[in-house]
Image (tube, grey):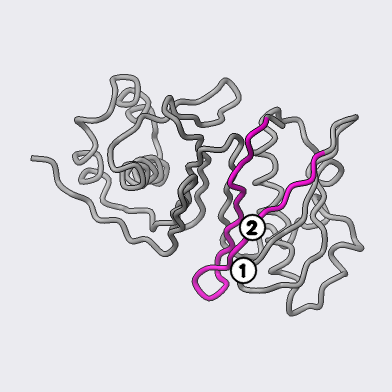
Amino acid sequence: MNTQVKLITIFKKESKKHYIQVSEIKKNTNEMYSSLKKSLSVVEKDKFAQIKSIKRKNEWLTVRLMLKELLGKYSEIFYTEKGKPYLKKKYYISISHTKNFAAVIISKFKNPGIDIEILSDRIYNIANKFMYDNEIEYYKNTERQQFIYMNWSAKETLFKIYEKGELDFKKNLKIHPTKIKKKGKINSEITKGDFRKKIKLRYKFLNNTKYILVWYKGNNSNL
């Protein structure tokens, strides 16, 4: 009999057309695999066996447990040549993970995107690589780290939405300044050559602002 693995979820949002979940990445690898083994395809089992890192194995398994919980049954995740995940069912999907947590959005709209980040010095120290000086200086010291991570996470989300890749985070992705709150909306845009698309993202700080989650539920047309 398969063991039921209980997920610890810190954020969940449901509507008629999209679902979002953020759950703790489980560390009981064998137990998780045992609970999913009968549902996994031969291709998935082979792919899992090729993952060397225990951390990556746990991320891989946790995401699939989350998807099973959101859909009420297991659904295999496929990947395009560029590594974008997709489902063969009526939903579109985007996935993200950071230290301790994984985030998943499934949507009936095309091109959803999601990103979760832990606030640390890692991205903060390289802000000039994806932001202009006037953007960085716009915020007070007390808000700067939060905005820099909001900016990075939003641009990661835009990159996933765009699908085609080859975007310069500094030149092609624009995040408009916004007042820092616990949750809110972000006005953003993607510009590349003749292509221009304005996109309204949503964000939420989690676990006493230790993490930021940014997402886009998708739209009915291709970008």
Could you say whether the residue bearing mark 2 is in a helix, strand or loop?
strand
Q: Residue at x 36, y 47 (%)?
A: 70
For label 1, count other residues whose C-alpha is less than 10 Å away and answer few (under 14), some (14-19) or many (20+).
some
Q: Is residue 204 magenta?
A: yes
Kindly identify which numbered label has been placed on residue 202: 2
Q: Quadrant of residue 153?
A: bottom right
For label 2, count other residues whose C-alpha is less than 10 Å away and answer few (under 14), some (14-19) or many (20+).
some
Q: Residue at x 82, y 64 (%)?
A: 177
Separation (CA) of disc 1 from disc 2: 8 Å
Question: Reading the chain from its start, which is encountered first: label 1 or label 2?
Answer: 1
Quarter of the picture containing the C terminus is top right
Residue, disc 1: 183
Mark 1 near mark 2, Cβ–Cβ under 8 Å? yes
In the rendered image of this protein, does residue 130 appear above or below residue 141?
Answer: above
Could you say whether the residue bearing mark 1 is in a helix, strand or loop?
strand
**Residue 192 as seen in the image, left or right of residue 19:** right
Please state the extent of the stretch shown in magenta in the rendering. 197-221
Count of numbered labels shown in the rendering:
2
Quarter of the picture containing the N terminus is top left
